[in-house]
Image: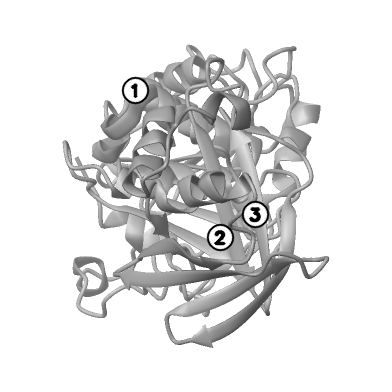
Amino acid sequence: MTRADLAAALARRGLSDAHLDEWFPDFGKIHYRIFEIEIGEGRWVLHENADGVDFGTPFAGVLALSTTNKIVAQDDQNRCPVTFDLSRTGDVLSVGVGDDACADLQDLPSQAAVYESSPFRLVQAADWSPPTSSPQASQGPSGASHSNEASTSGARQTLRPIGTVDGAPLGYVEYLPPSYGKQPSPLLVVLHGSGESGAGDKRDLTGLASAGIPNLIANNRWPDGRPFIVLAPQHKEVPPSFCMEANEIDAFLRFALKHYDVDPSRVYLTGLSCGAIGLWNYVAAHRDEFVAAAVPIAGYGIGAVELAGCELARVPIWAFHGSSDANVFVRGDVYPVTTIQACTNPQPVDARVTVYRDESHNVWDETYTSTRYDIYDWLLGHHK
């Protein structure tokens, strides 16, 4: 929220914004603040950050349900119970400050501003599953999980060290489906986490098979019926370039489109952790220039949405994150997706976020093998 959001919220309650500089002295140095409340099992936790910087230890307390639309919250020392009035429209939860036992304290205006300055979006695990009548289902093998289908994927995965393929800007791992060459194939570019960074030579490329989709392919857990060309480039970590850079991804996509028999209308990105951060940054820089849909997992897209704003709505994005992720806080995917969902110019093509309750950083194992959330059919459902 911006300073103007806070000031307007105070004005609606008949309060002056004269103390804003006292309560929020850093507003002149930042572009936005995020206040996020996690509610569950009779507890509340308030996280706060600005421009993606966490302010430290969150505030926590106890919740009690007073009526269907009211909750009473107090801190861990049982001081200052506050009644909040809740109203929900779709996935938007509006929170208003009702009775406050601490009304004589200076924190009431700031509480009112924090909770009322903008609606809170309710985020929970998605119930979406692919429709049985989807076009892909009627066309035979596609992105479906095919859990019982035989796989020869391990024999079809090849290391392509840096310098061995003309024009390749990075070393990479290649998978070609059995159907490759019969017709142009959809392309899925997989971006690894920081633990798999390397020089792109033969030795370091073997490390890419330790996680995510390359691991599934190497262990014959990638169905032959999935039509994707899968390419996993390797990032060489050179400070400050910790994660894959947007320009690296762009150069690799241009190479792949030129070198392989790719259907240019079906180019997809997915990435985990550091790879998801690179994915967000690439989409912020290049929008839908090449990419038809993207799946970031345990990533951080706050900077991307601040840079590109509603232009990100042009790219279908389905993000996944664990609610208890201590490596990359869950707001790293929740905030950008919910911001995109609120866009009107343009309206989002498809923006969704799935939060795994009580899961930590590694939610990619579950996402890449899930039958409940079939990202492969979802990806193939989008084309340029």
Which residue matches tag 2?
368
Residue 42: % across, % down: 68, 78
Q: Quadrant of residue 88?
A: bottom left
Which residue matches tag 1?
286
Q: Name the foreground residue: 117 vs 378.
A: 117
Amino acid type, residue under disc 2 in the picture: Tyr
In the rendered structure, the answer to whether residue 35 lies left or right of residue 57 reads left
Mark 1 or 3: in front is 3
Residue 223: % across, % down: 50, 65
Q: Quadrant of residue 21?
A: top right
- The residue at 55%/20% (across/down) is 245
Mark 2 or 3: in front is 3
Say which element carries label 3.
strand
Q: Alpha carbon of mark 1 to alpha carbon of mark 2: how far?
A: 25 Å
Q: Is residue 125 above or below residue 46?
A: below
Task: Tell me, yes or no, whether the two marked residues, 2 and 3, touch with CB atoms within 8 Å.
Answer: no
Amino acid type, residue under disc 1 in the picture: His
Which residue matches tag 3?
46
Residues packed near mark 1 inside 10 Å, few (<14), some (14 to 19) or many (20 plus): some
Q: Alpha carbon of mark 2 to alpha carbon of mark 3: how far?
A: 31 Å
